[in-house]
Image (cartoon, rainbow, N blue to C red):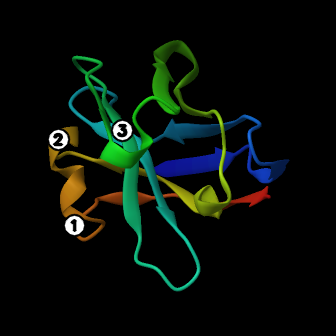
Amino acid sequence: VQLQASGGGLVEAGRSLRLSCAFSGFTIDDYAIGWFRQAPGKEREAVACINTSERTTYYADSLKGRFTVAIDAAKNTVFLQMNSLRSEDTAVYYCAADTKDGSLWYRGPNGIDYWGKGTQVTVSS
């Protein structure tokens, strides 16, 4: 199983950024694929994910309306569109995949099946 995240970088507050997670090595059905993030000195937290079977999406409450997760199954890629970025969005963003339903990701990162390497997102104010 491989998860390859890309798209991070330095961006000004208020601007947008799109992260991509290319996945391979597992059957797409019945997985939740999405993103966690970890800011310096803080715990890793769930950002957003999508259930690959029903295309149901889940978001951290604080991010609803600004972030959008989507999947392109033909390209085996999950995207995270981040709009109106704030300095507090600065973190390393990790792509993840798990057989648990996405509605359970709010419980935290423990028990997540697969992780990709993180991509740094820095928002300057």
Q: Which of marks 2 and 1 is nearer the N terminus?
A: 2
Give the spatial CA distance, label 1 vs label 3.
15 Å
Mark 3 falls on what kind of element? strand
Q: Kindly report the distance in space between the C-alpha atoms of the residues bearing marks 3 and 2.
A: 9 Å
In the rendered image of this protein, does residue 57 appear above or below residue 33?
A: above
Question: Mark 1 — residue?
Answer: 111
Which quarter of the picture shows residue 84?
Answer: top right
Q: Check disc 2 and give the amino acid type.
A: Ser
Crowdedness near tag 2: few (<14), some (14–19) or many (≥20) residues, C-alpha within 10 Å = some
Among the 4 quarters of the image, the one containing residue 87: bottom right
Task: Report the amino acid beneath label 3.
Answer: Cys
Residue 15 % position (x, y):
77, 37
Q: Name the residue under label 2.
A: 103
Q: Is residue 15 above or below residue 56?
A: below
- The image quadrant where one finds the C terminus is bottom right
Give above or below for 104 relative to 29: below
**Residue at 43% across / 42% down in the picture?**
63
Q: Write down the residue under mark 3.
A: 49
Query: Given the image, on which type of amino acid does mark 1 rest?
Result: Gly
